[in-house]
Image (cartoon, rainbow, N blue to C red):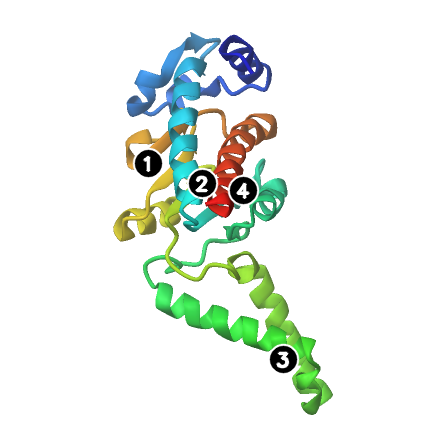
Amino acid sequence: MEQAEMLQKMIDVGVHLGHRKSKGHPKMKPYLFGVRQNIQIINVEKTLQKMQEAAAFLKEVAGRNGTILFVSTKMPAKPFTKEFAQRLSIPYVSERWLGGTLTNFPVISKRLEYFLSQEAQKAKGELEKYTKKEQLMIDRELEDLEKKMGGLKTLKQLPNALIMVDIEEHSTALREAIRMGVPTVAITDTNTDPTLVNFPIPANDKSGKSVRFVLDYLAAAIEEGKSEFIKS
C-alpha cells in the first residue's frame, strides 16, 4: 500500500480522532495535527512513523523466537483480543490483569503449571477417582483458572515485548513492565503520556476500526518475523 493510500485509510477508520482538548495530555502535543470542534486531531504521518518503528521492533523479537504478550481487557478491542493472539500464537490477557504477572512471575508460573497439570489429568480421565462433589469443585476451579489465566498457558518466561491497547486502563501492567525491563508497544490516545512507553503509537483507542487497523499492521510484522525464524 502506497503511503498516501495508507494515510487516507488511517483517516477513514478514524485513527486521527483523539479526545476532547480538556482531556489531552501535554506530552502528546508533538503528535497532534491540531484541534477541530474541541477534539484533538492526531497527525497520522506521525502515527504511521511510530507504527513502522513498533512493527520493526516486533518483527525482530518474533524473528528470534521471542515471547510477545498481548494485553487488552477493555472495549473496543476486547472482542478480538483472543482472535489476534491466537492468530499469532502468542499469550494474551483479555480479562483482568493479574497483579504480579511480571513482577512475581515465579508464582504465576507455578500456578500455570498446576492449571495445565489439572487440565491434563482431566483430559486423561484421571479425575474420575474423585467423588462427584470433588470433581465438581475441580471443574469450577478449572473454569475460574481458564477465565483468569487461559490466555497465559504458553507464557513460559518473562515476555520480550508487551503490546497494550490502552495504557491508562492497563497502568498496572505498564508499571510491571517498566519495573522488569520488558519493552512496551502501546496505542497511546491523546489523553495518555507516550513517554512511558518504549514504542508509543499515537492513535484513537476508542474505535474498534482504528484499533484493529493498528493491530493488523503489527500482526503482519510479527507474522513476517515468525516466518523468518522458521526459515532460519
What amino acid does circle 2 point to? Met
> If you read the primary sequence from the N terminus, does the residue marked by circle 4 or circle 1 appear first?
4
Mark-to-mark CA distance, 4 and 3: 33 Å
Q: Residue at x 43, y 51 (%)?
A: 67
Q: Circle 4 sits on which residue?
A: 74
> If you read the primary sequence from the N terminus, does the residue marked by circle 3 or circle 1 appear first?
3
- Residue closest to the eye, 161 or 127: 161
Residue 6's spot in the image, x, y percent? 53, 15
Residue 175's spot in the image, x, y percent? 31, 48
Q: Circle 1 sits on which residue?
A: 197
Residue 73's spot in the image, x, y percent? 53, 46
Mark-to-mark CA distance, 3 and 1: 41 Å
Q: Residue at x 37, y 15 (%)?
A: 32
Q: Nearer the viewer, mark 4 or mark 3?
A: 3
Mark-to-mark CA distance, 3 and 2: 34 Å
Examine the image and state in which quarter residue 161 appears: top left
Q: Circle 2 sits on which residue?
A: 164
Can the viewer see residue 44? yes
Horizontal side of residue 32 vs 13, given as left or right: left
Q: Tell me if residue 230 comes above or below residue 99 in the rendering.
A: above
